[in-house]
Image (cartoon, rainbow, N blue to C red):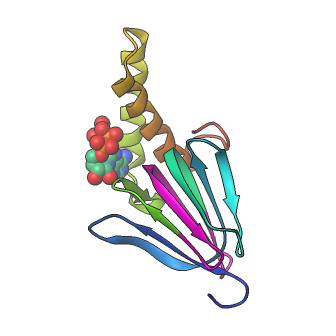
Amino acid sequence: MAESGGFRVEVVSPERVLFSGDAKQVITRTLDGGEIAFLPGHISFLGALVENHTRIYLSDGKVQDLAVHGGFVEVAPDHVTILSDAAELAEDIDVTRARAAKERAEAAMRGEHDAAVEADLRRAHARLSATGGLTHGAAH
Ligand code: ATP
């Protein structure tokens, strides 16, 4: 168990640990349940994630924002692990690139809708939300 009533949070891909730290809350978005907040002591849970702006409220009072583009969240009373092939820390996100991707996807959606373009738009929204470029609640 992490110190002072928190839990251990890790964001990992098969290749690397993107983030690891002690936290007191994690908010992410699952396929079935929408946005969910996990607190220390939560019962075991396994969920599939959609593209989303994930927030990790750290024990030291800081907040780590991330864009997470699918994957899984595994929760136990003393830890949360997010397993995702595609996730970025907010500080690593290039906002200009994400804005350009959003505009491209929006332009493409004025033509024929297709699932790939919708996914492009959801990734861009998650990136912009994680970097504060979308108002809270606008991204999925
Ligand atoms: P773009 O159209 O700008 O390439 P994309 O959504 O098609 O964006 P992805 O296929 O999701 O890009 O990602 C390809 C790689 O580029 C991944 O490693 C991803 O982390 C990185 N990446 C994509 N967009 C950004 C961004 N705005 N800032 C930082 N890294 C990004």
Q: Is residue 111 left or right of residue 76?
A: left
Query: Of 54 and 62, which appears nearest the observer?
Result: 54
Q: Main SS type for the magenta part?
A: strand
Q: Is residue 131 visible?
A: no
The quarter of the displayed image where residue 92 is located: bottom left
Instruction: Name the quarter where the N terminus is drawn.
Output: bottom right
**Residue visible at 67% across and 44% down in the picture:** 136
With respect to residue 23, does 55 lie above or below? Answer: above
Query: Of 46 and 111, which appears nearest the observer?
Result: 46
**Residue visible at 55% across and 50% down in the picture:** 53
Q: Quadrant of ligand 1?
A: top left
Is residue 60 in the magenta section?
A: yes
Q: Is residue 94 visible?
A: yes
Q: Position of residue 65 (x, y in %)?
A: 55, 60
Q: Is residue 89 left or right of residue 43?
A: left
**Residue visible at 42% across and 11% down in the picture:** 110
Is residue 61 in the magenta section?
A: yes
**Residue visible at 37% across and 8% down in the picture:** 111
* Residue, far left: 15
Q: Is residue 48 left or right of residue 62?
A: left
With respect to residue 55, does 17 lie above or below? Answer: below
The quarter of the displayed image where residue 18 is located: bottom left
Instruction: Name the quarter where the C terminus is drawn.
Output: top right
> Which stretch appears magenta?
56-80
